[in-house]
Each structure stands twice: as C-alpha cells, then as structure tokens.
Amino acid sequence: MSQPLPDIALTRNDGTPDSLGAHRGRVLLVVNTASQCGLTPQYSGLQALQEKYGPQGFEVLGFPANDFGAQEPGSDDEIRTFCETGFNVSFPLFAKASVVGEGKQPLFAALTEAVPEKRGDPEAFRERLRGYGMTPNPDPEVLWNFEKFVLARDGSVAARFAPTVAPDDADLVATIEAELAKG
C-alpha cells in the first residue's frame, strides 16, 4: 500500500471548495468520468456501489475529464444534470479538469505516482484503442475514462483498476470490502 496522499484542494462541480482531506476516514473510489463514452453506463454501477456501501463509510468521487476523444464536452452544470437525470447520481462530482499530461489536476498526479500500474486487463483495452487508430497512454498515465482508484481510510491508494473493470467486478468489490473491513 502506498503512503497517504497529501490533503489536496478540490473544487466541486457546483464551484464549492472541497479537499481530499475532507473525505479521509472513508474508503473512496476515485473515478475519472465522461458523459459520451462507451463506458458511461458504468455510472449506474458506481451509483449502486455508493448506495450499497455508503452507509459503511464508502464514497464514490467522480471527476469529469475531457481528455479522451472529447467525450466530456459539457459544462459542469450540464454534466451534473446529465448524471442526476440519466443515472440518479448522488455521489460527489467535481469540476471538470484534466487527468493526464502536464496540466493534470494534482489529485491525479498523486494517484498515478502512488500506484503506476492498474489491475484488470489494460493491454486488451490498449489494443482496442489502437484498432480505432488511437495511441493509448502508457502507464503511469490514466489510460481512458472510468479508470478507478480505491483509497483506504487513511488516504493511501489501496488499488488501481483499468477503465474496463466494471463497478461490479469481483476484484474491485473485494478490494472495497477489504478496505471497509479494516474499520
């Protein structure tokens, strides 16, 4: 397990300030999201995780990003409306920001540094992207929309999962449950 992440300043989707430290003490699933991606239906599974495990000290944190195929073109208000009306999302959404490259938000810089490689089958997804004529990001960069980071209650990164790992994936769920069991 990695060291606890610093208390990184965040901005909610509605413009209110937040911080990573404000969520410490909870098991977190940090996910970069997009509204027009083939993986967008994962919002339903993320909300299901929030509903099932939220009462036990779990929280999904959604971070919209327009880094991959311009699949998150909307404003923060449009994104929030889309998530609430299309998927009944109740977990926190944050302001749209980059999760890759030189200008990536500090949270994702810290996450990818803490755990450079992802679980799941990122190579199969990279091959799929190459088949569409795209050049996928190498590790440690975020590969695509819906990459997932599980943070322990102390703020350390317990695991990182490839975008194609669904919210109901047995390994992901077992990781969340194991972190919750640590109290």
Image: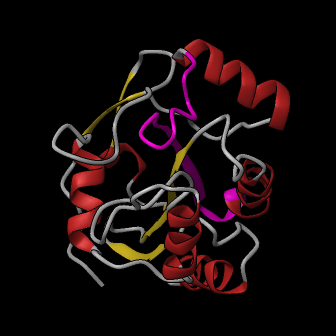
As for residue 144 lying within the magenta part, the answer is no
Q: Is residue 146 above or below residue 89?
A: below
The answer, for residue 183, to whether it is visible in the render is no
> Residue 127 appears at what percent x and percent y?
53, 74
Count of labels in the image: 0
Work out whether residue 106 or residue 183 is closer to the camera in this orientation and state it. Answer: 106
Left or right of 46 on screen, residue 135:
left
Q: Decide: is 152 above or below 141.
A: below
**Residue 152 visible in the snapshot:** yes
How far from the left and from the top, in percent, is residue 155? 33, 64
In the picture, which quadrant includes the N terminus? bottom left
Q: How is the image coloured?
A: secondary structure
- Residue 111 location (% of width, % of height): 29, 62
Left or right placement of residue 97 versus residue 14 in this view: left
The foreground one among 176 and 84 is: 84
- Residue at the location (70% across, 68% down)? 166
Q: Is residue 60 magenta?
A: yes
The answer to whether 119 is drawn above or below residue 135 in the figure is below
Quadrant in which residue 53 is drawn: bottom right
* Quarter of the figure with residue 56: bottom right
Image position, residue 160 (x, y; %)? 44, 73
* Residue at 50% in and 65% down: 130
Tell me the residue at 64%/72% (across/down): 165
Q: Residue at x 46, y 55 (%)?
A: 134
Start-end of magenta stretch? 54-74
